[in-house]
Image: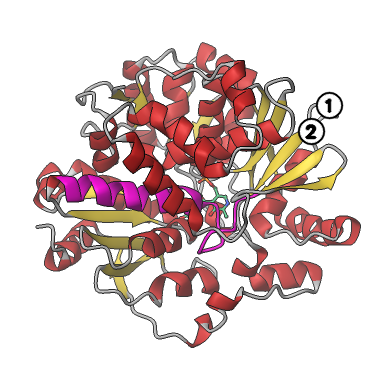
Amino acid sequence: MQFVSTRGQAPALGFSDAVLAGLAADGGLYVPQSWPQLSAADIASYAGKPYADVAFDIINRFVDGEIAPAKLEAIIDEAYASFRHPSVTPLVELEPNHFVLELFHGPTLAFKDVAMQFLSRIMDHILAERGLRATIVGATSGDTGSAAIEAFRGRDTTDIFILHPLGRTSPVQRLQMTTVLDANVHNIAVEGTFDDCQNVVKAMFNNHKFRDSVRLSGVNSINWGRIVAQIVYYVTAAVSLGSPHRKVSFTVPTGNFGDIFAGYCAKAMGLPIERLIIATNANDILRRTMDTGRYEMEGVSPTISPSMDIQISSNFERLLFEAAGRDATAVVRMMDSLKQSGGFALPETALANIRRDFAAGTTGEAETRATIAATLKNSDYLLDPHTAVGVHVARAQPWSATPMVTLATAHPAKFPSAVKDASGIEPALPAWLGDLYGREERLTVLANDQSLVEDFIAARTRAA
Ligand SMILES: Cc1ncc(COP(=O)(O)O)c(C=O)c1O
Ligand SMILES: N[C@@H](CCOP(=O)(O)O)C(=O)O
């Protein structure tokens, strides 16, 4: 299996090289050259199987023999042994025909753990086999960073540098990153927004001299290794609800579009998904794009679901590539226009293709709070603000007999003050994080400036 860039100018790579590369050399994102197909019998065979077994069967189709199956199986088993729920990602019925898929039972309480626990182990394996070290960089609005730091801490093959927007994460998210004091972990608080952090990360990848000199690798969902691991829970959830004999719809709280793109991948592989619903907070660029056919940047406003305070939705590029019939030239045109003028128009057929598979809705701040309060009252279930954005959008969809699954992307305890404001209940952190507020912090504040960040990294990485 080869992976090709959405911009068509970078060499096609196998799984291991695509994972180590993160972003393609032409600035594009890697996608598989073709979608491996799950037959109805394959899907039916997953019923009752442990999560790790399903994960192995799906991920192995993309690894395509590059890693010995027994080794891959061991890596996947170990990754999901760190989850605190035996099903790894359990489904809970919220109300008739509406379920939440709890993705927050990993070590840092957000869905990012599902992919990151896999990615750190697979990268470690590939690097160790090649006798190499890499410099890992990531931009975070709070959850990717904590999951990545937890997954990569203490590893000899990697140094990890995480950029977060100064003062724009929840205190729990910040502390989960900055209190990890392992020598290979470096936290940079950037004076700017998440989009600024992500722009610096992408610019470092596009600075080929720097990229090569520190052997740069990425852990954001621009890395195919993140997406592939997220396909799995769409499959396990759909199978629990009766697939392949029954269709399922998913509503996904969305920012960088990685999580919902994994749902698209599952559908492309043959999972019977009826609709994928994009749920945005007040930073609603994706919902507006679905309405108007124009992707148009506006400023980012801080919300109580801060992890989704994003305007440049990286993985939307993967969907554009697919929807435009894999026309890399059209993708380059759109991305150039985004860079130059802050927006672009979608080609008509691409828009029609996207509207066939996706719908979208927005949840404002007051609605997010009201959803948390009402869900506690009516279903005795405490939502985090990101999941509440999804639940509100799911409830606003036209009625359908098809089961709806809303992805519960974070544990409410990551956002205690927003949840308390909305519900009157302050969710407690689990025991292993109980002393988080008392731990020593380490971080460096830097201006939003690529060369300052590059100098900081170059002076500290062991991969140079
Ligand atoms: C809690 C939470 N929910 C939802 C999202 C949005 O996910 P994605 O960026 O994959 O669209 C994020 C961050 O990305 C998150 O941290
Ligand atoms: N919400 C994210 C933003 C980065 O998303 P990613 O999935 O591309 O890593 C975060 O929590 O950092």
Magenta includes 115? Answer: yes
Left or right for 455, reference 238: left
Asked which secondary structure carries label 1, the reply is loop
Q: Residue at x 40, y 64 (%)?
A: 150
Q: Residue at x 29, y 22 (%)?
A: 2
- From what the image shows, is residue 232 above or below residue 132? above
Q: Is residue 154 visible?
A: yes
> In the rendered image, which quarter is residue 246 located in?
top right
Residue with the most extreme front position: 70
Left or right for 157, reference 383: left
Three-letter amino acid code at the position of disc 1 = Ser
Quarter of the image with the N terminus is: top left
Residue with the most extreme bottom position: 438
Q: Residue at x 44, y 56 (%)?
A: 144
Picture coordinates of residue 215, whole percent (x, y): 15, 49
For the stretch drawn in magenta, the main secondary structure is helix
The CA distance from mark 1 to mark 2 is 8 Å
Q: Nearer the viewer, residue 320 or 33?
A: 33
Three-letter amino acid code at the position of disc 2 = Gln
Left or right for 135, reference 99: left
Residue under label 2:
397
Q: Residue at x 29, y 68 (%)?
A: 154
Dot 1: within a 10 Å radius of its alpha carbon, few (fewer than 14), some, or many (20 or more) residues? few
Q: Nearer the viewer, residue 277 or 62?
A: 62
Q: Is residue 282 visible?
A: no
- In the image, the segment drawn in magenta is 102-129
Residue under label 1:
400
Picture coordinates of residue 43, whole percent (x, y): 60, 24
Q: Nearer the viewer, residue 223 or 8?
A: 223
Picture coordinates of residue 51, whole percent (x, y): 56, 43
- From what the image shows, is residue 195 above or below residue 191? above
